[in-house]
Image (tube, rainbow, N blue to C red):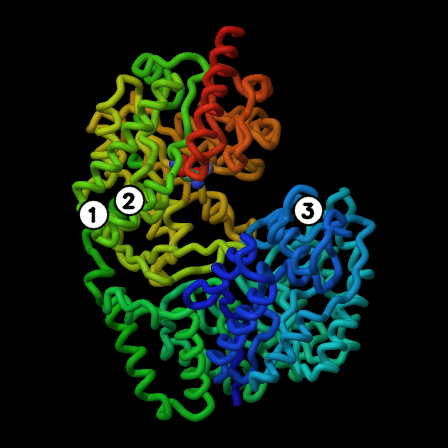
């Protein structure tokens, strides 16, 4: 008999109930008791949804973040929240976001750093450690939820983050070695495991996704030490790995003294047989067969075909599960009444994925004939998607096949282009510009909503957006900026805006996925070959350019960013989808050029995020990602100036690829690092122009002229002034006009001062 279980369920609720409850609490509009009550309801609902499973995750629910939960469980809180008033929950939110409900003045602390959870778009709160860090157990949350689960009549399997991955995710605040904390950490894990056993947990899922990354010998050794210590404790441990292949860590993972191992059989399917061979005969193998990272139906017959021999070999030792926690997919396809019915029939969200799991288990345990109808319906959906003309567009496939190297090549090298561009554009030294967006005001949002609800006509909507564009242009002229933008008033989101106009994309209504805390994103669904039926931005940009004699920068989102912020196809490599996007955006670039736009910015905010977990795979990703950018950007005349923008500047390890993008100008976020992030550009002798951000747009603070001048002088120590631009760190859409005007005013004044001094 194969058992079925789940590694984690989305906690936000099918209608983002958690988000609204969190935000109401933070604003002081509801009480702690009300928030906790809603959380309890969500957990009960999630367990009910999962009640057909043999083992149900407990402790996967979180009021903010599961890593922060673990820090609380281990008693590892930053000293800055010691001794503050309020409840434990108040401190929890202080670490999460700097403040709790009704905090003011002295109760505000700086929030914990947030970073991406492996290669997902989920962000966790980085545990802070120093050589002085001590740990002490606080098991209340887990024990409380375990008791609740029992009341709900499910067979509970507590889920915790393992000690090695916990340290791997932590950051030393004092330059010490965080691995030195392992001996202090393990006794707390032992106590926790004993408490869970006392509370009746037979199995505990202990997540160690660090095992799918490249580990040096100290880290490998830490795994040995940790699990040889924890084997003395009573609950059976299911060591969970996910998000990738184990490779050189495979034998280590198989041989750690635990009762079971979970592997990601979607991303590491080719390793399953090896794992079966290596796994000691007393161990359970949990095979993650349903993709927890995308929204497509599983090809059940396909899985059964390869799974059958594994099931025969393992018998009762086989467990089946999604590849990873379902945190990374939306809750329920059942809510998507408006979604195109063909496309809907190809999809599975969290609830549907669990139903698939049940079908697989019944096929294996009770015989295929017991689920013949389900398998046939699944096969029909898979076939319909494989054959659909809406997915497969021979013209697009042909266009990708006939991409030749010259498509990614500018006509002349940067040195020659730069000369022509300078003559053509006639910009001063230290030209000033912005990154694209101006404030997305309440008014703009309301207008867009009214248009969506058909309360106002398309004509009224366009007129209103044009008025916003005109306002942005006039303000920029008044400020005296050198290169203007249209301000992006008409764009809800930098990816959705393009996705909505491209063939091959659909949008869900409730397909929300948690990004961090109460913030959820609704990734567009890239389902088919991508094409661009008509120009997407040209009318807006042309209109903006018609209002001014200053050069206006056309604004596009690049193919890699569109790809990385979407749910993508599983029936072709990501690189193929990216090239299709590149060809579509390239057409837009060429149309903008033909419409007289001399400067075009192609944002690649998410290029770095797409880097694979393993360094060995970085280069092949960078190769196709950069090639896609080049195809998008490089079909223009020498005189046309291509800009790109990235919201982070840690380019140390990928500078060569950044240079290979060959954008005439790159604008990046640098203000908070005192321009230190430019060092790598200096060392590499980066040849093209750079706009290092001179002020942080995340803060409402207005930068002074002196601050900006000082930063630019630091920049000029690293990059020749002739190749420097002056701009903010990123777009201004989240700011208010009364903050934007004085900040940019100072920025322009700083640029003038710099010119006078040189
Ligand atoms: N052009 C976009 C803007 O200004 C860029 C946003 C981003 O980099 N995330 O908003
Ligand atoms: Zn940015």
Instruction: Check disc 2: other Cα within 10 Å, few if <14, some if 14-19, many if 20+.
Output: some
Q: Residue 456 — which label?
A: 1
Q: CA distance from mark 3 to mark 2?
A: 38 Å
User: Where does the image place residue 185, in percent across and percent down from the top left?
Assistant: 78, 62
* Mark sitting earlier along the chain (2/1): 2
Residue 581, above or below 505: above
Residue 508, above or below 287: above
**In the image shown, does 41 or 369 lie closer to the viewer?**
41
> Which residue shows up at 51% across the image and 83% down it?
53
User: Where does the image place residue 565, in percent across and percent down from the top left?
Assistant: 41, 51
Residue 186, above or below 361: above
Instruction: Check disc 1: other Cα within 10 Å, few if <14, some if 14-19, many if 20+.
Output: some
* Mark sitting earlier along the chain (1/3): 3
Q: Residue 670 — which label?
A: none
In which quadrant of the rendered view does residue 507 lie? bottom left
User: Where does the image place residue 48, in percent across and percent down from the top left?
Assistant: 49, 80
- Whether label 1 touches label 3, CB < 8 Å: no
* Mark sitting earlier along the chain (3/2): 3
Question: Which residue was labeled with disc 3?
Answer: 107
Determine the secondary structure under disc 3.
helix
């Amino acid at each position: 008999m194969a058992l079925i279980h789940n590694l984690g369920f989305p906690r936000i609720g099918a209608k983002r109930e958690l988000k609204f409850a969190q935000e109401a609490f933070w604003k002081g509009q509801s009480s702690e008791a009300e928030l906790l009550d809603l959380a309890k309801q969500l957990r009960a609902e999630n367990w009910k949804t999962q009640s057909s499973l043999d083992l149900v995750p407990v402790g996967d629910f979180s009021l903010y973040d599961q890593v922060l939960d673990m820090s609380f469980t281990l008693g590892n809180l930053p000293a800055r929240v010691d001794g503050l008033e309020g409840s434990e929950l108040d401190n929890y939110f202080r670490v999460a976001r700097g403040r709790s409900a009704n905090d003011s003045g002295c109760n505000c602390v700086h929030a914990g750093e947030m970073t991406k959870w492996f290669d997902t778009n989920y962000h966790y709160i980085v545990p802070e450690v120093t050589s002085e860090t001590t740990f002490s157990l606080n098991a209340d949350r887990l024990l409380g939820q375990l008791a609740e689960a029992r009341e709900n009549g499910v067979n509970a399997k507590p889920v915790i983050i393992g000690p090695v991955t916990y340290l791997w995710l932590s950051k030393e605040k004092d330059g010490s070695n965080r691995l030195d904390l392992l001996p202090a950490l393990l006794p707390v894990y032992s106590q926790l495991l004993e408490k869970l056993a006392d509370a009746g947990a037979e199995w505990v899922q202990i997540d160690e996704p660090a095992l799918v990354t490249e580990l040096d010998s100290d880290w490998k050794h830490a795994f040995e030490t940790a699990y040889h210590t924890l084997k003395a404790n009573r609950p059976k441990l299911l060591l969970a790995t996910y998000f990738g292949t184990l490779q050189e860590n495979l034998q280590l993972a198989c041989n750690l003294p635990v009762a079971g191992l979970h592997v990601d059989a979607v991303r590491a399917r080719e390793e399953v047989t090896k794992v079966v061979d290596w796994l000691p005969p007393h161990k359970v193998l949990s095979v993650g067969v349903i993709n927890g990272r995308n929204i497509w139906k599983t090809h059940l017959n396909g899985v059964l075909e390869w799974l059958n021999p594994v099931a025969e070999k393992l018998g009762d030792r086989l467990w089946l599960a999604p590849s990873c926690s379902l945190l990374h997919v939306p809750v329920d396809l059942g809510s998507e009444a408006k979604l195109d019915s063909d496309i809907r029939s190809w999809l599975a969200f969290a609830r549907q994925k669990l139903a698939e799991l049940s079908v697989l288990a019944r096929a294996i345990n009770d015989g295929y004939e017991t689920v013949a109808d389900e398998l046939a319906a699944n096969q029909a959906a898979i076939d319909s998607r494989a054959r659909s003309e809406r997915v497969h567009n021979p013209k697009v496939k042909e266009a990708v096949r006939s991409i030749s190297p010259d498509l990614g090549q500018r006509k002349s090298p940067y040195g020659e282009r730069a000369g022509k561009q300078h003559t053509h554009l006639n910009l001063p030294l230290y030209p000033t510009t912005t990154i694209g967006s101006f404030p997305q005001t309440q008014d703009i949002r309301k207008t867009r909503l009214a248009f969506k609800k058909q309360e106002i006509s398309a004509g009224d909507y366009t007129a209103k957006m044009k008025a916003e564009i005109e306002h942005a242009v006039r303000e920029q002229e008044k400020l005296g900026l050198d290169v203007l933008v249209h301000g992006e008033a008409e764009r809800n989101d930098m990816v959705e805006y393009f996705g909505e106009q491209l063939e091959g994309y659909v949008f869900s209504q409730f397909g929300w996925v948690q990004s961090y805390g109460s913030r959820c994103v609704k990734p567009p669904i890239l389902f088919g070959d991508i094409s661009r039926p008509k120009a997407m931005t040209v009318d807006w940009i042309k209109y903006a350019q018609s209002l001014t004699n200053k050069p206006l920068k056309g604004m596009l989102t690049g193919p890699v960013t569109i790809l990385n912020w979407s749910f993508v196809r599983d029936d072709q490599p990501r690189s193929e989808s990216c090239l299709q996007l590149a060809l579509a955006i390239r057409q837009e670039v060429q149309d903008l050029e033909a419409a007289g736009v001399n400067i075009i910015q192609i944002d690649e905010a998410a290029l770095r995020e797409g880097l694979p977990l393993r360094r060995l795979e970085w280069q092949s990703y960078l190769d196709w990602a950069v090639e896609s950018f080049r195809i998008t950007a490089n079909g223009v005349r020498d005189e046309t100036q291509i800009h790109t923008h990235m919201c982070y500047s840690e380019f140390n390890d990928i500078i060569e690829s950044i240079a290979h993008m060959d954008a005439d100008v790159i604008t990046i976020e640098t203000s908070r690092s005192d321009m230190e992030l430019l060092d790598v550009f200096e060392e590499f002798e980066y040849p093209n122009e750079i706009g290092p951000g001179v002020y942080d747009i995340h803060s409402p603070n207005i930068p002074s002229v002196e601050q900006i001048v000082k930063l630019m002088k630091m920049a000029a120590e690293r990059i020749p002034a002739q190749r420097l631009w002056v701009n903010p760190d990123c777009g201004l859409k989240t700011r208010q006009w009364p903050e934007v005007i004085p900040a940019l005013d100072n920025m322009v004044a700083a640029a003038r001062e710099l010119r006078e001094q040189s």
